[in-house]
Image (cartoon, rainbow, N blue to C red):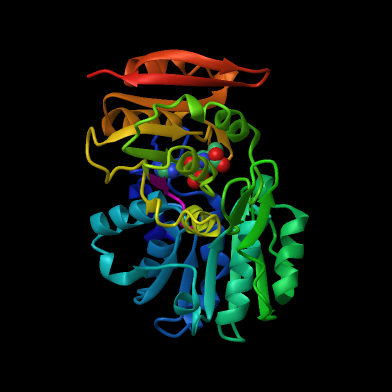
Amino acid sequence: MLINSELFDRLRRFPDVEAPNLLAVDAADRLILDEADAALVAADDGSVVVIDDHFGALTLGTAARHDAFGLRVHQDSIVAERALAANADREGMLDRFTSGELSEELLTGAQVVLLQLPRSLSALTEIAEAVARYATPEVAVFAGGRDKHITIAMNDVLGRSFGEVQASRGRQKSRVLRARTPIPGTPTYPVTETLTDLDLTVVAHGAVFAGPRLDIGTRYLLDFLRQTPRNIGVAVDLGCGTGILAAELARIRPSARIIATDQSASAVASAAATAAANGLADRIETLRDDVASSLPDASVDVVVCNPPFHIGAAVHTGIAEKMFESAARILRDGGELWTVHNSNLGYHRHLQGLVGRTTVAGRNRKFTVTRSVRTR
Ligand SMILES: C[S@@+](CC[C@H](N)C(=O)[O-])C[C@H]1O[C@@H](n2cnc3c(N)ncnc32)[C@H](O)[C@@H]1O
């Protein structure tokens, strides 16, 4: 529809990484809005919920096309949340929606739920169970994505929480799964597991990286934490996931204050729960933020970081570079960034240029751990 194509041409990804091959609106956004059109026309004001909108196309597209107010939005990523807010601000549409957690408050009274399918089945499970539990019995869910990311297992996940699940016809390599007739059940997430070799209890919500398991890159970086300075005042686990690095650092550096930060609501909730499960709640603060942007300059002694090397499905070093820039900003002079990365990514040059003197602390067949000392 014209109203949306003009709007969509103006939407930006900012503050997420922007690049010519990375777009703010995809064919799945358009298909979800088209598939849900009749349901959105029929929905009462304040009964539409949008989950995991990438950059605002679903929320602002609904607001524009249906002159809708009172949309309720949950985005796991704070970067996505800020992108929606920035786009809404430019379009004069900040009054059309409110943002909140994946909760009873978000979903009570929901008649229509629009969802950009998350990448993991565990994230989808947590969302589907929440919708089935709290939305109205008449709720219609339109969950869309690019064909290459949609699996049969997603139908099965939705089928455990809804009596009817149907796939739409494909369009522009995208598809929508329509779900109706919710089956409320006991929530699966968060899950808790004990990593016996670390004697650490890990708590994971659905969307968190690696779930309750230990990533092999993280495993390797853990081996080096004892080489961090003994007298740490403040340390940051940048992109903390379930907070395993934060918890280990808190244990081996008992006088340090640790900040575990991530852009994902699921990660921050998991890291807080992991800290509590290991008796470290008073030692570890959590912060949902885009690359720790709210921490003051030169305020931190040590940053530990296992950065992502994907944006969505694409291999892209943009977020890692953003994290290294942020580490450089928040580290005090002489402070240290410890990071792990796939050896073939060759981050050494970036680290040396952005942070300071960088040495390889260890390398195995897959990963390299580096120590960069901040010099201003
Ligand atoms: C490779 S995972 C590492 C997670 C955890 N530290 C571990 O070792 O298990 C990278 C983490 O970075 C987070 N992340 C991605 N983009 C981010 C951003 N812009 N700001 C903060 N965290 C971000 C992801 O949500 C993810 O939890």
Question: Depth check: 64 or 19 in front?
Answer: 19
Residue 267 place in picture, x, y as percent: 50, 52
Q: Residue at x 41, y 14 (%)?
A: 358
**Count of marks placed on residues:** 0
Residue 218 drawn in magenta: no
Q: Is residue 364 left or right of residue 83?
A: right
Q: Is residue 336 left or right of residue 143?
A: left
Q: Residue at x 66, y 46 (%)?
A: 213
- Quadrant for the N terminus, please: bottom left
Toward which corner of the image does residue 324 lie, by quadrant?
Answer: top left
Is 240 rendered above or below residue 69? above
Residue 376 place in picture, x, y as percent: 22, 19
Which region of the structure is painted magenta?
A: 258-265
Toward which corner of the image does residue 16 lie, by quadrant?
Answer: top left
Question: Depth check: 218 or 42 in front?
Answer: 218
Is 235 rendered above or below residue 196? above
Which SS type dominates the magenta stretch?
Answer: strand
Q: Is residue 283 left or right of residue 96?
A: right
Question: Depth check: 27 or 150 in front?
Answer: 150
Residue 191 place in picture, x, y as percent: 65, 61
Q: Residue at x 45, y 53 (%)?
A: 77
Is 241 rendered above or below residue 281? above
Residue 253 place in picture, x, y as percent: 43, 38
Q: Residue at x 70, y 67 (%)?
A: 158
Is 172 rendered above or below residue 348? below
Report whether residue 23 is seen: no
